[in-house]
Image: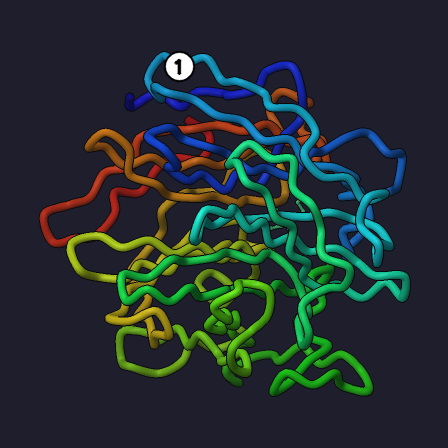
Amino acid sequence: MKQTRYLVPGDYMADPSAHVFNGRIYIYPSHDWESGVPENDNGDHFNMKDYHVFSLDDVEQGVVADHGVVLRTEDIPWAGRQLWDCDVAYRNGKYYMYFPLKDRNDIFRIGVAISDRPEGPFIPQENPMKGSYSMDPCVWPDENGEFYLYFGGLWGGQLQRYRNNKALECAELPEGDTPALCPKVARLRKDMLEFAEEPRDVVILDENGKPLTAGDTGRRFFEASWIHKYKGKYYFSYSTGDTHLICYATGDNPYGPFTYRGVILTPVVGWTSHHSIVEFKGKWYLFHHDSVPSGGKTWLRSMKVVELEYNEDGTIKTIQGTA
Ligand code: FUB
């Protein structure tokens, strides 16, 4: 399937996290809607209040099943506002959803909700994960039996408000030749409900082995962490935010460091770009979104899928965001 395909024409869904559970693809997107909140650099216009789950048996022609609302802000005991990009993992008979949400002080934290089934509904825990901050969680079940949670995002994602996992007095966004802020990763406890360790920096290196700098906006991390493995290598992919690219870097273990390798997706219509990558029935797919169906409204995005291909050397063939 070389042609990009929209997946849920009747509604606005973004940030699709796709996984294969029980031989089917399950997609966990953000649910965009017209809340009337004006657009700003803090992302207040992304005022989402619930999640749906979708599934499909066949990416090429498959009909996408909508499993309905599986979690709402009003069901989350510590909720303030804004349910952004979530992700889901399976362990020992349960499905664990990790979701970012602002608490009542308008601080992003990461919550966990649990279901017996991949299609939900998901029941939230009483409190967010201890020591969690920022947004865009992505959970990786490693072959070593451990699960790792990646997270973080700049600007409205609030990562610039922290250093060494502690809140700063005032936010500080590095500039120029100073090292860029890194996404974070932490191994999860066996019960999947808390970090088993202090989150660490996911360092992304350039071709000379130096950390990418804050001024290198065409390559540095902004948000939308995703990780997959191909031919023994770990591929960490992410959005560059204000330069609107999905890029990737490769490494030898879940903690990195990762070395920058290139662009997966050129800019789409709409400010944000956010993706997931999954293998299904022998092919690889890029799930992502754009704002074409809403006429370019940044906060009303539509979910898409396209086949992703590798070159012989393991690099990924760049996909055109406007294709
Ligand atoms: O959907 C809200 C935010 O927009 C996500 O968390 C970011 O990754 C961006 O897609």
Q: Is mark 1 within 8 Å of ligand 1?
A: no
Is 143 placed above or below 255 here? above
Left/right placement of residue 127 relative to residue 251 reads right
The residue nearer to you, when weighing 111 against 18, is 111
Residue 39 visible (yes or no): no
Q: Which quadrant of the rendered structure holds the N terminus?
A: top left
Q: Which residue is mark 1?
A: 62
Quadrant of the rendered image containing residue 299: top right
Res 111 quadrant in image: bottom right
Task: Identify the amino acid type marked 1.
Answer: Gly
Q: Secondary structure at mark 1?
A: loop
Residue drawn at (49%, 80%) of the image: 200
Is residue 112 placed above or below 203 in the rendered structure? above
Q: Which residue shows up at 50% across the image and 54% down it?
A: 239
**As drawn, 111 above or below 169:** above
Residue 23, image quadrant: top left
Residue 321 position, x and y percent, is 45, 35
Residue placed at 44% from the left, 63% from the top?
A: 219
Q: Nearer the viewer, residue 297 or 68?
A: 68
Q: Is residue 98 visible?
A: yes
Tell me where residue 296 appears, x and y as whole percent: 67, 29
Q: Position of residue 166 (x, y in %)?
A: 69, 85
Q: Is residue 105 left or right of residue 130?
A: right
Left or right of residue 281, residue 98 in this image: right
